[in-house]
Image (cartoon, helix red, strand yellow):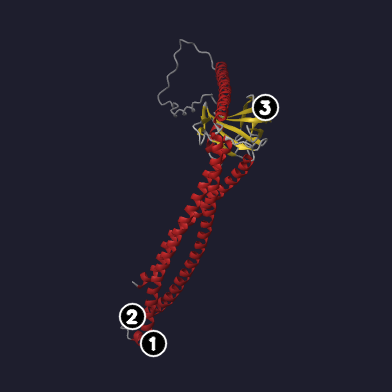
Amino acid sequence: MMRKKILLPLFVVGFAMAGLAQPVQDKVQLEKERQEIQRELQEMQGLYNKLKGQTKKSVGQLNVLVRQINLQEQYISNINRELRNIDDDIYLSELEIYRLNKQLDTLKSQYAKSIVYSYKNRSNYDYVNFIFSAGSFNDAVKRVAYLKSYRAYREKQVSTIQETQQLIAQRKQQQLIRKDQKNVALQSQTKQVQQLAVQKKEKDEVVRELKTKEKDLQKQIADKRSRDAKLKNAIFAIIERERIKAIEEEKKRLAAIKDAERKTTPVTDPKTKPAEPRPGTITDSRPKAAPAEKTYVPLNANETALAASFKQNYGRLPWPVDNGVVCSNFGTNKIEGTLLTEDNPGITICTSAGAVVKSIFDGEVLSVFNLGDGMAVMIKHGNYYTIYSNLSSTSIAKGATVKARQAIGKAGSDENGGGKIDLLLMLDKKNVNPRPWLSR
């Protein structure tokens, strides 16, 4: 029973430490998320400062502000989660300190009783008499062992009391540290909330100005739809040429195989029946290989492997520019403050005019073409295709093999003199959102 009482404080400490382990892990994850949000916010602010200097407001400026506000709200949410973790941590520490103090009181009480007992039986004669009054030698040995165990128990009591006192002191120190961290987080929260209010005010100003020139916006949207349709037709024509080319190459390959088989197979009399396998003959009963995944454009072995590699890099592909932010998302985007919407077959990345544009994966350049108001490059990655449009110039040619992060051209300008590119991703003939495929 006494042994269980000694081990109880250690059990309480272990339980409390297990409760504290999860907040520590959460803190690391929250810090990682915060750093990523801060980095993107800095890029967004740098881009917005350039857009803000333009004489007239634009949809791109509004989109950047909306994205900036979303990031700011994520940042504040991150701080709020940290505050909840700190509060939980402080509560668990208080609970642990309370339990340790209760156990410390129990340990001190037990130790005091053992001291009183030792004081009352402090005579050496009593110890000697206790041993020599044993009925047998074995009983005397057991009594000596008991006295040693009792002495060890008292020493353990002292050690456990000291350890418990140290743990209490450590927990109190940790509480002070966490309270300081809470104060810092609260100050950061206040600052970020104020920044969010400023951003929302700027957004409202942009929305008010855009409302006054809704006709201009309608024209811009119509021009973009026309340009997207032209780009779509060009892409489909390129893919169709690839499909016809792949089918012809496959026909030639199969014809060459048949021709080779005819030359190596001996001629037999058509009236002669094929010999039946003799009893006991081993025949090939291995399962047939699974048919290859059907794609719109037939793929050879190298292209199939490249497509598989591209798919495996989901969420890890590099950005096509070193510094840029998404200022128009994939799909239907409503222009805030108006009834207008725009459809984006890919994502629009705002960057500096003339910024170097790079391929996001290994592949083959299928086409380099001019849309009238900018150049476009289409690269094949198996049955995946990436298209980079609104380029001011290109540095590669059709048929070239490119590597990931290899320069392919430079970003063009937008309607207000800033820089931007459109990135499209297609699987066969279907548009796919490229944003989640990128590393950040």
On screen, residue 352 versus residue 111, left or right, reads right
Proximity of marks 2 and 3: CB atoms separated by less than 8 Å: no
Task: Identify the mark at residue 139; answer none if there is no mark.
Answer: 2
Foreground mark, 1 or 2, reads: 1
Q: Which sits in the foreground, 290 or 275?
A: 290
Whole-percent x, y for residue 205 in the image: 55, 40
Whole-percent x, y for residue 439 in the image: 56, 41
Q: Which sits in the foreground, 327 or 111?
A: 327
**Quarter residue 144 falls in:** bottom left
Task: State the CA–CA distance, disc 3 to disc 1.
Answer: 100 Å
Q: Quadrant of the C terminus?
A: top right
Q: Is residue 181 above or below residue 214?
A: below
Type of residue at label 1?
Arg
Task: Identify the mark at residue 397; answer none if there is no mark.
Answer: 3
**Quarter residue 387 falls in:** top right
Who comes first in sequence, dot 3 or dot 1? Answer: 1
Q: Is residue 341 above or below residue 79?
A: above
Whole-percent x, y for residue 250 in the image: 56, 20
Q: Which SS class for mark 1?
A: loop
Whole-percent x, y for residue 59 in the image: 57, 35
How busy is the neighbourhood of tag 3: few (under 14 within 10 Å), some, or many (20 plus)? some
Foreground mark, 2 or 3, reads: 3
**Quarter residue 275 falls in:** top left
- Note whether residue 438 is visible: no
Q: Residue at x 56, y 43 (%)?
A: 202
How busy is the neighbourhood of tag 1: few (under 14 within 10 Å), some, or many (20 plus)? few
Task: State the CA–CA distance, disc 2 to disc 3.
Answer: 99 Å
Q: Which sits in the foreground, 41 or 25?
A: 41
**Residue that carries the numbered disc 1 in the rendered image:** 122
- The residue at the far front in this view is 212
Type of residue at label 3?
Ala
